[in-house]
Amino acid sequence: LTPPSKSNSAIEPSKLSPEKLEEELFEMFLKTRFHASNVTGIAADSWLTIMDRFLTLGDERAEEKAEMKERMLKLIDIYYDSIDAPKKGDKVYLPDVLKPDIFPHYMVRDKTFKSTSILGTIYDFVESQTAEEHKTPPVQKSRYFHVLKMSQSLSTIWRNVDSGIRFTEMR
């Protein structure tokens, strides 16, 4: 692994006057808030996509796996540089050659491939369970409604609710 770059030309905050520190912090806030870089997220997604493919390749594809390792290491460096960039005042770029064109299906993007890695398998399992969990169980009338005496209007409301009609107002 290569360590992230350590260039830091910024003045230490303790050497700034309170007014200058406030100005610097406010400028940094505006820069990161309104000109936020999405390099961190793209680098993370790119790394995950390459790692997913890496996990499914066999040993017979050693050369391709070595290239993938290099790309992942570069993405790791870019990721950490992008995290530190706002406090250093740096701008970090992600080269297009490191960005994937197609993503694993579990990342839910426009262009996807069916991932056979453990991540894709887990995603598919959770999706299948989630679909089953969202079935609404039937609602049954409580046996206590036959025993309790209710006013006519309350009885009508509950009869309608039981029939599947929803009221938004009670009159």
Image: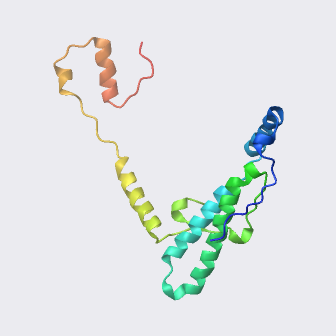
Is 86 displayed left or right of 65 in the figure?
A: right
Instruction: Name the quadrant containing residue 138.
Output: top left
Q: Is residue 157 above or below residue 162?
A: above
Side of 153 where 120 appears, left or right: right
Nearest to the observer: residue 93 or residue 129: 93
Q: Position of residue 52 (x, y in %)?
A: 53, 70
Q: Residue furthest front?
A: 15
Determine whether 159 is above or below 14 in the image.
above
Image spot of residue 124 (x, y percent): 42, 62
Image coords of residue 22 (percent x, y): 79, 34
State which quadrant residue 5 falls in.
bottom right
Q: Is residue 111 visible?
A: no
The residue lying at 55 percent from left, 60 percent from top is 107
Quadrant of the image for the N terminus?
A: bottom right
Identified at 77% across, 60% down, the residue is 7
Q: Nearer the viewer, residue 128 or 27?
A: 27
Q: Left or right of 12: which side holds 76? A: left
Residue at far left of view: 147
Chosen colour scheme: rainbow
Residue at image location 42% in from the left, 66% down from the top = 121
Q: Position of residue 153 (x, y in %)?
A: 32, 13
Quick check: can you spot residue 93? yes
Above or below, comparing residue 110 to residue 32 in the picture: below
Given residues 12 and 106, the one toward you in this image is 12
Q: Name the image quarter holding the C terminus.
A: top left
